[in-house]
Amino acid sequence: MRRRKFLHHSLLTCSVLAMDASTHLFEIYKKKYGWTRALAKSVKHPEIQFPPEKRIPLGWPAFPVSHRSEHTVLHFEKPTQTSSQAWLRLTAAIDFREEKKIDVLLPKSGEKIGQFNIRYAHPFQPFQVKVMKKHLRKIQKDGIELRQITGKKDAWFFGPTIDHKDSLGFHPHLLIGSNESALSTFKQNMYGLQVLSPFGWMGGCVLDALSEMEKTGDQKAAENLSRHLSHFLHEDYGVRYENPHTEPLDGRFNSIEDFLPFSAIIRKRPQHPSIERAMQFLLQYEQPDGLIISGNKMSTEGCYTVAYPLAVWAVYKHDAAIAQKSIRQISLRARYLMSDHGIHQQGTRDGSLAFKNWGRGIAWLMLGTAKVIRELKEGGFDHLPALVELTYILQRAAALVTHLQTSDGLWRSFIDRPEVAIDTSASAGIAAALAWGNYIGILEERYTDQAELTQQNLPRFLTADGLLTQVSQINRGGESLQASDYRVIAQFGMGLMAQLDAALNYLQN
């Protein structure tokens, strides 16, 4: 197995990162659809020690934007085209656990031309700022200066020497132009590293999509799934990745939310040693009634991140006892978190509840339930009486969401609050669950009509280079952040969108 190469922390304190001008990988990256990436050819930054407790995913280089007075300057290759539409794009290399504002300035004049408003972040997450056409010539000549004006810690972004052509979107760059075929570019992204996400629930959304695409005979998806897994699986350690704090976690697991990727791993590499280790870790959290949770707290995420991998494992092992464990993860969570008033994303055994009718929380419950039913029915466990309760759970949830879909086929971050902005990730996840529900014969055809309406409208939120915007940020800022109009780009949303496409393809074909 090819080992990943990791940079020593000391290498990241240098003041200049530069791309190799001799290789085509770092020239202007131009698509045939009318957009261009002007890549940063060098980054001049203050000499700051990388946090020793952290590790940059995949060993890729990174550069800092200081929270102190020092500034960082980017210089770019000359764009091959101009356009009224341009964005400066940076991608987080580590987790941000605070709100940061980073001013974007012209170095010579000091003129402020934009500002990054970053409210938390995870590795591989891109952020962008609109750049006016009139500034492009000065940017090409003098570069761009970055100054962090709020935030107590340095921000670290991926640098300009990433090795793979299909991951150039992680490179600091100017995205110039528009794309009437953004959906085609989105689909191409699903075949590359541009959808790479941290191992765990985020990466699992993408891996699950690739796995579903592979099951339809999509060879490119199959190859990309293998490629993604190669970054995280290790023959000796089992797994090699970073926890949500971007700290190395080799051969270990962080929490029960780490297990969604194993639905794809079990199918793709069923003999890999990480699987038995993962299931042993997971089952140590099993409580007397069969619920697998950490402590007293539960969430709807477990319907997808715990129940679904267990169902895939049960089918592979031909083990009815494991199948029953999978079913119980959903039925028990539903008893605590579902009511006549809606669905709560999280709660405790003593009755406290939070995040009522949060869209992504509903998506986790519905998608996990639909996929567990499908997995077990197709895997020879359709005789289990407990599946009847899961059928009822999915039907109840579908009845709730169907009346709260917007006229253009989407759902809000809190689906019953008309003042709250749309969340494309929740919309894709809920719609995918509706489509799967119809596919397995539990939901009526009208639910597929709703899913198709979602599919028709999600492409409106794609960037020129095929990334999904209008995603509610990861849940680190509490209900207030989710209820705000703050939205981001996130690859897990792209995974959910691809799952919607896969589910509808199953129905149509």
Image: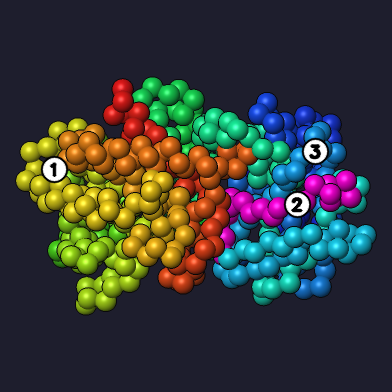
User: SS at mark 2?
Assistant: loop
Give the residue at x 67% y 75%. 152
Which image quadrant for residue 114? bottom right
Q: Label for residue 131?
A: 2
* 3 or 2: tag closer to the N-terminus: 3
Viewer-proximal residue among 490 and 411: 411
Crowdedness near tag 3: few (<14), some (14–19) or many (≥20) residues, C-alpha within 10 Å: some
Residue 124 lies in the magenta-colored region = yes
Location of the C terminus (image quadrant): top left
Residue that numbered label 1 is attached to: 320
* Colour style of the rendered protein structure: rainbow
Residue that numbered label 3 is attached to: 82
**Where are the magenta residues, as a range?**
120-139
Q: Residue furthest front?
A: 407
The type of residue carrying mark 3 is Thr
Q: Is residue 325 left or right of residue 234?
A: left
* 3 or 1: tag closer to the N-terminus: 3
The answer to whether marks 3 and 2 mark residues whose Cβ atoms lie closer than 8 Å is: no
* 2 or 1: tag closer to the N-terminus: 2
Viewer-proximal residue among 96 and 463: 463
Give the residue at x 45% y 22%. 219
* Residue 358 visible here: no
Residue 49: x, y in percent?
A: 74, 65
Report the Cα–Cα distance between label 3 and label 2. 12 Å
Q: Is residue 507 left or right of residue 479?
A: left
